[in-house]
Image (cartoon, rainbow, N blue to C red):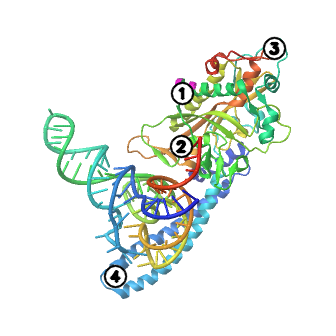
Amino acid sequence: MLDIKIIRENPEFVRQQMAALQDLNAPVDKALALDEERRRLLAQVEELKALRNVESKRIGQLMREGQRDEADALKGEMTRVGDQIKLLDDQLKIVDDQLFDAMSRIPNLPLPGVPVGKDDSENIVVRTWGQPPQFDFPPLPHWDIGEALGILDFERGVKLSGSRFYVLKGLGARLQRALIAWMLDVHIDDHGYSEVYPPYIVRAQTLFGTGNLPKFADNLYRDAEDDLWLIPTAEVPVTNLYRDEILPAGSLPIGHVAYTPCFRREKMSAGKDVRGIKRGHQFDKVEMVKFVEPEQGEAELASLLDNAEDIARRLDIPYRVVQMCTGDLAFSAAAKYDIEMWAPGCGEWLEVSSCSLFTDFQARRANIRYRPEEGAKPRYAYTLNGSGLALPRVMIAVLETYQQPDGSVRVPDVLQPYMGGVEVIR
RNA sequence: GGAGGGAUGGCCGAGCGGUCUAAGGCGGCUGUCUUGAAAACAGCUGUGGCAGCGAUGUCACCGGGGGUUCGAAUCCCUCUCCCUCCGCCA
C-alpha cells in the first residue's frame, strides 16, 4: 500500500510511474477522488460529533441539577444531530472501503534507479559469474538423468496428485534434504540470519499483508471450510511475523531464514515448462526475510542478493544476476533482482532466486512499525526478501552440471557431509 | 467434537450508562536531593486520522464488527482469539 499523501501531493508523478510499470488499471484517479470525498465527509461528521460530545455532557449536568425540561429539549436536538451523524458515518464507511480497495490495487513505486522497460525483454543482466561447464559428451537434461538413476519418478507423482507433481526417491530425496539443511546452515552461521519455522497454512489477512491478496487469489490453494490458505512462499508467514507490531528501539535490522514447502495453483499454459521438475504446484524453498530501517534499504538489498549468490558460488554453479525493469517488476516490489543458474542439460538459465526490496509497501499493508529510538514516533519498517534458494531448480542445476559420462552425478563438495559422505549418485 | 470462564494502556489490574480527560500498582522518562547511586518526593509517560507553516485544535480507538441511547469500557447481538475440564490424537 502506498501512502495516500504521495498520491495526493504528486498525482502526476504517480501516474507516470504507473505507466512505467505497465499498470494501466491502477486506480490512481479513483483513489484521489475518494480521498477528497473522504476528507470532506470527515470534516463534516467530526464537527457534529464535537457538538454532540459537548452537549451530551451538558445534558448529564442538567439532569443532575434537576433541570429536566432543558435536558429534554437538548435531547430532542441531539437526536437530530445523531441521525445526521449516522447518515454521514454510513457514507464515510462506504467511501473508506472504496478508498482502501483502490489503494490495495495500486502497486508499489519503483526505486529511482530501476531501468524503465516494457517487459522482461528489457531486463538487464548486471553480472555473470563462472564459466558454463564444458562436456566431452552431450549433457543430458535432468529428467533423463533422474529417471535413469531412479531418483526422480514422474509417473507416480502424477498418479498421486495429477500433472506437475513428481516424487523424489532415494539419493534424490536425500540430495534435496541435504541442500535444504546446508543452505539453512550457511545463512544462519555465515550470513547471520536466525531460523524460523512458520505455519504453512495461513489466514487471508496474512496474505493481504504481503500483497498476495486480493489481487492474486487465483494462484493460491485454499481450504474453503476454515478459510485457510496454503502459503505460496515462506515470505508470507515470515514477513507477517511482526504484523500489527511496533518493534522496540534497537530491534532492526532483523534477518530471518525459513525453509518451507510452497504451494502454487498457477493456471499454467499447457506446453510451457512441462518437462522435468522446473515448475510444479508444490516445491521447497529456503527464504530470507529482512526488516530494516528505510535508510538501509538499498544496502540491505545488495547484501541479501550477495547472500543468495553465495550459495551458487559455494556450489560452484555458474549464474547471472538480472535486474527487473519497471515493466517486469512484481506488484509489491520497488526493486528486484533475479539470480539465474545455468542448466547445461536443458540449456537454459533457471530462475533460482528473486531478491526484492519492498520499501514500506508491505509494512503499510501489514502494519509493521519500529521505533527509531526510545520514546520516538513509530515508523514503517522496510521489508525485503529473497530466495536462498528455490530447490527444484537448484536440484536441476546440480544434476545437470555435475553429471558424468556414465550417467552418474558427482555430489558437490559442500553437500557431501550432508549426504552421509556419499560422493557420487549412481 | 462437548461443557464452562475470559479478552481493559508497555505489563498487572479496577471500572453504579453521564467530570472516564480510564482508578491503583509495576515498569520507563525528567527533575529535586546526593560526590555518584539507591531511597524518597514531584511531574511526565499510548496509536492513528483530519485541519494548520506552527503553537495547537478536533475525531476515533477498552479483542473485531453491528445495535440500543442525547450519551457506551459499561447494556444487547455476533465473530475471533485465549484459558479450564471432558473426548480424540502424531
| Secondary structure found at label 2 | helix
Q: Residue at x 48, y 67 (%)?
A: A46
Q: Read off the residue under disc 1.
A: A188
Mark closest to the chain's N terminus, 4 or 3? 4
C-alpha gap between disc 2 and disc 4: 51 Å
Q: Name the mark on residue A241.
A: 2
Q: Which of marks 4 and 1 is in front?
A: 1
| Identity, as a three-letter code, of the amino acid under mark 2 | Leu
Against A9, residue A374 (above or below) is: above
Q: Which residue ends up furthest to the top in the rendered image? A: A136
Total label count? 4
Mark closest to the chain's N terminus, 3 or 1? 1
- Tags 4 and 3 touching, CB below 8 Å: no
Q: Do labels 3 and 1 share a chain?
A: yes
In this view, the residue in front, A414 or A316, is: A414
Q: Magenta region: which residues?
A: A185-189
| Identity, as a three-letter code, of the amino acid under mark 1 | Ile
Q: Residue at x 58, y 37 (%)?
A: A384
**Is residue A326 among what the camera can see?**
yes
In this view, the residue in front, A30 or A152, is: A152
Q: Nearer the viewer, mark 4 or mark 3?
A: 3
Q: Read off the residue under disc 4.
A: A63
Mark closest to the chain's N terminus, 2 or 4? 4
Q: Whole-percent x and y of residue B10? A: 39, 49
| Identity, as a three-letter code, of the amino acid under mark 4 | Met
Q: In this view, does A369 lie to the left or right of A272?
A: left
Q: Is residue A196 left or right of residue B13?
A: right
Q: Read off the residue under disc 3.
A: A406
C-alpha gap between disc 2 and disc 1: 18 Å
C-alpha gap between disc 3 and disc 1: 37 Å
C-alpha gap between disc 3 and disc 2: 48 Å
